Image (cartoon, grey):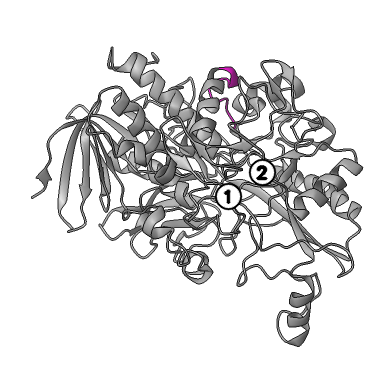
Amino acid sequence: MAKTMKKVDAVIVGFGWTGAIMAKELTEAGLNVVALERGPMRDTYPDGSYPQTIDELTYNIRKKLFMDVSRETVTVRNTTADGALPMRQLAAFLPGTGVGGAGLHWSGVHFRVDPVELRLRSHYEERYGKKFIPEGMTIQDFGVSYEELEPHFDFAEKVFGTSGTAWSIKGKVVGEGKGGNPFAADRSDDFPLEAQKNSVSGTLFGKAAEAVGYHPYNMPSANTSGPYTNPYGCQMGPCNFCGFCSGYACYMYSKASPNVNVLPALRQEPKFELRANAHVLKVNLASDGKRATGVTYVDAQGQEVVQPAELVILGAFQFNNVRLLLLSGIGKPYDPVSGKGTVGKNFAYQNLATIKAFFGKDQHHTNPFIGAGGNGVAIDDFNGDNFDHGPAGFVGGSPMWVNQAGTKPISGLAVPPGTPAWGSAWKAAAADYYTHHLSMDMHGAHQSYRDNYLDLDPNYKDAFGMPLLRMTFDWKENDIKMSRFMVDKMRKIAEAMNPKAIGVYAKDFGSHFDLSSYQTTHLNGGAIMGTDPSTSAINRYLQSWDVPNVFVLGASAFPQGLGYNPTGLVAALAYWSAKAIREQYLKHPGALVQA
């Protein structure tokens, strides 16, 4: 028999960035809050203690901080005609587990959003006409504007301790000639910290990009360029460019994480409780299905526990949010044949391609082992709609950058095309080029399509006997067109560096989604936001249309993927939703938007 706990004002599922932000906001509003994290307790100490954390074998190869696929995973297929099989080894994407979630092991690239991408369908229809959007592409507007979110972007950057160079503040250009991005949207305030120093690779990329007529800028980084104390009183130390960000807890307290930037403040809050090793099975509903009464979870001892609550916040990883909605019967499951239903709809990813430039020993010494997760130099000339898509014939854009995060000794030995895969020739090439190469990425936006979606798998279950989530996903012609276009533009930058060799790693027509190699962990959609309950699972405040005391945070709300990394928008939307709860919902509980 399940154990029933004392009722609380709010229960939060997942303690990554969104869970931590919402916990802080709701306790500030006077609510008693319990956060449930399915994984173990993690923190900078002991998980980020030096030198144990600088261990590529444990963290990047054996994936200590990531989802345990022996207990829970997803099944994957390219089309509905294929059989879906469970992912038994993490590779293409790396969901986190434990306190901090993906916010503990992320790199620290901290962009806002291109305003165009918040109203993507409307913008394309206005500029290029409705027929420009390919049949079967299901992109939508978010239902919220950049202007509405700007104060929340600003506050999130102050919480994260983000380093960067502003272009314009309150309409005044301040970043020209200083590393600002001329394509960036206007800001209400500067970054809390100046941009980090550039690596040799970033400097080379910037000079080459400028030489071919592009506009390089300093990437915004949630890795500190100096000591910092955030609005919550949480302290950070300056980054030392150790090169161990993505996949690791930062031993310098320099990379923003929920553990460093929010949790210390929450520990002082008597209205907050964090329970680790609490695996939530479902959201419990009242008999009419229109109100959540709390959640059921399994604790570390295997005991089933019911946590009653007035308010339920889903702040888990993207596909875990979607799975919980489906398991709980909240919202109508999406059907790709009819196009009806909303939960599972518009699953999208990231459209990545890479070019590596290899230099002779008398050219450039790039020191690739040095790095910081968010640090780099980028261009936005082909991001968003900063160029004419008409002649190009595809939807979407891409930033391009050198983001030198630290090339690791096991997995980071890049060699030029044509090098043997093993033996003395491979060893010689690895030695020759390790400190004489750089890598640049096209970080393309990925669009949503009618037949890329999520549902419950009818055949496979997790360790608790619950159906796994099934991912039906493949690349489309629009994705390949965009990728090839961007690679051609990025190759010009590589050629301007006069390298000895160039390696291009990109999709070609006929390419299918492949789980075997890492791309990004930027998964989007499945519980998308919008202004119409027939086409979105949650409203513009991230509130369920069907069960109004359930809010669903994170990238699961994105109707399609972005060119930028998602964390900045995820954080801003969490603060946006929290403001609506504090100023509207708590005064008058119920739907914040009338259907």
Q: Residue furthest left?
A: 1
The amino acid marked with disc number 1 is: Cys
Q: Are marks 2 and 1 in contact (CB under 8 Å)?
A: yes
**Is the residue 102 above or below the residue 434 in the image?**
above
Q: Is residue 397 visible?
A: yes
Q: Secondary structure at mark 2?
A: loop
**Residue at the spot of label 1:** 239
Q: Nearer the viewer, residue 202 or 463?
A: 202
Q: Identify the residue shown where x is 57% and y is 28%.
A: 140
User: For this rendering, which residue is in front, 203 or 491?
Assistant: 203
Residue type at mark 2 is Gln
Q: Residue at x 68, y 54 (%)?
A: 404
Which type of secondary structure does the marked residue at label 1 adopt?
loop
Q: What x and y, as percent, mark residue 331?
A: 35, 32
Q: Where's residue 339, x and y in %?
A: 50, 34
Residue in front for this viewpoint, 457 or 493 = 493
Mark 2 or mark 1, earlier in chain: 2
Q: Nearer the viewer, residue 242 or 113?
A: 242
Q: Residues within 10 Å of mark 1 (few under 14, many from 20)?
A: many
Q: Is residue 401 left or right of residue 99?
A: right
78 part of magenta stretch:
no
Does residue 144 show up magenta in the picture?
yes
* Residue for point 37% across, 32% down: 22
Instruction: Quickly name the residue at label 2.
Output: 196
Q: Main secondary structure of the magenta part?
A: loop
Specify start and end residues of the magenta stretch as a single range. 139-147
Q: Residues within 10 Å of mark 2 (few under 14, many from 20)?
A: many
Left-right relation of 406 to 129? left
